[in-house]
Amino acid sequence: MSKSLKEQIVKMGKGTLLTNQEIARLVGCSPKTVFLYAGSFSSRCKEKTSKDKELFRVRKAVLLPDIHYPHVDKKAMEAVNQFIFDYAPDELVYMGDQLSLDCISKWNKSKPLLKEGQRIISDFENFDKEILQVHEKITPKETKRTFLLGNHEERLKWYIEEHPELEKMIDIDRNLKLTARGYKIVPFNEIHKIGKLNVIHGYYWNKYHASRTLEAFGGNVVYAHVHNPQMFAKVSPVDRKEYHMATALPCLCDIKPDYKKDAPNFWVNGFGIVEHLPATGYFNQYTMIIIDGGFMWNGVYYGKEI
């Protein structure tokens, strides 16, 4: 074995938490060779645990998809709020389309009666009061808060392109003071990572959106956008441990909005939970389905009284 290859193995063994199989695949040798120069994966983990215990504390995140304020499903959100208080997540992730912003929608441009009484600033103020401030009160101050911009928030950009005189006046960060409050803002179509999981708002709306998303990403991804839970997995025939999944989450908005005129749709209420280990990036992601304003987790019912 060349000296440089040995040095690579030793460096990866000391500087990362890759398994022996992963190191072997990267440097092009056998797992036995990695064991010879870097030791066992478990022994390396124990050594690093003693140095930085925080890396081995499981972190918890709650994913909040498609609130579409003011069209939020209030019963579903109240159940989620009860859960958030008990669960005490390390991170809250707003997955895009937090606000509907109907009054500046291009679809409503020639429908003044439909927009009657709607105001952008009121949407900001009420969303802050009824959603963000509530979540800030029921979670610890050190909770990470991540705010993905969805296609509905992107309506602000499109509107400013037509009305440049309003630039900055209707900026979402300026009105909600997200940066000042410590929120991480993720621009439209960009990715937020939780360990090895990619979190996005979502790109596709076709029947098999999970399959198409996985094909595009080639890695683990969870997304919102479609209001419809779906999952697709891809497993390597060469290495059964090498698998990826794309998971679509349900939504937290009204699943029977007025503009649908009671037409059938596939919308479902719900949200997501992610628990991950920072030392390795490995995670478990759970999709919670909310039925008639309630759901169960770990033997506890959350929702309206029954």
Image: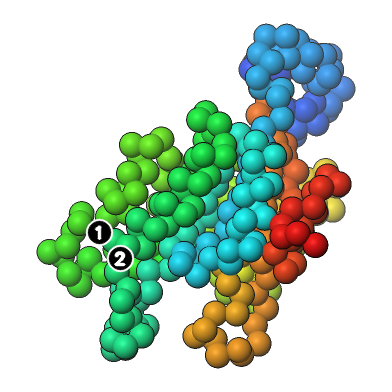
Task: Let me know if residue 162 appears in the view.
Answer: yes
Percent x, y of residue 247: 69, 59
Q: Which amino acid does label 2 sit on?
A: Ile
Going by the image, does 212 lie left or right of 174? right
Residue at (34%, 49%) from the top-left corner?
Answer: 176
Percent x, y of residue 237: 84, 53
- Report the residue marked by disc 1: 170
Residue at (57%, 40%) from the top-left corner?
Answer: 138
Q: Distance between the residues labelled 2 and 1?
A: 8 Å
Residue ranking furthest to the left: 165
Residue at (51%, 39%) from the top-left corner?
Answer: 137
Q: Quadrant of the N terminus?
A: top right
Tell me the element at label 1. loop
- Report the residue marked by disc 2: 120
Percent x, y of residue 98: 47, 59
User: How busy is the neighbourhood of tag 1: few (under 14 within 10 Å), some, or many (20 plus)?
Assistant: some
Percent x, y of residue 31: 84, 26
> In the image shown, does 230 or 73 lie closer to the viewer?
73
Q: In which quarter of the image is the C terminus?
A: bottom right
Labels 2 and 1 touching (C-beta < 8 A): yes
Quarter-of-image position of residue 225: bottom right
Does residue 110 sit above or below 197 in this rendering? below
Going by the image, does 238 lie left or right of 68? right
Does residue 11 sit above or below 96 in this rendering? above
Residue at (33%, 36%) from the top-left corner?
Answer: 180
| Mark 2 or 1, nearer chain start | 2
Q: Residue 255 carries which label?
A: none
Q: What residue type is labelled 1?
A: Ile
Tell me the element at label 2. helix
What colour scheme was applied to this rendering of the protein?
rainbow
Residue ranking furthest to the front: 305
Going by the image, does 267 lie left or right of 183? right
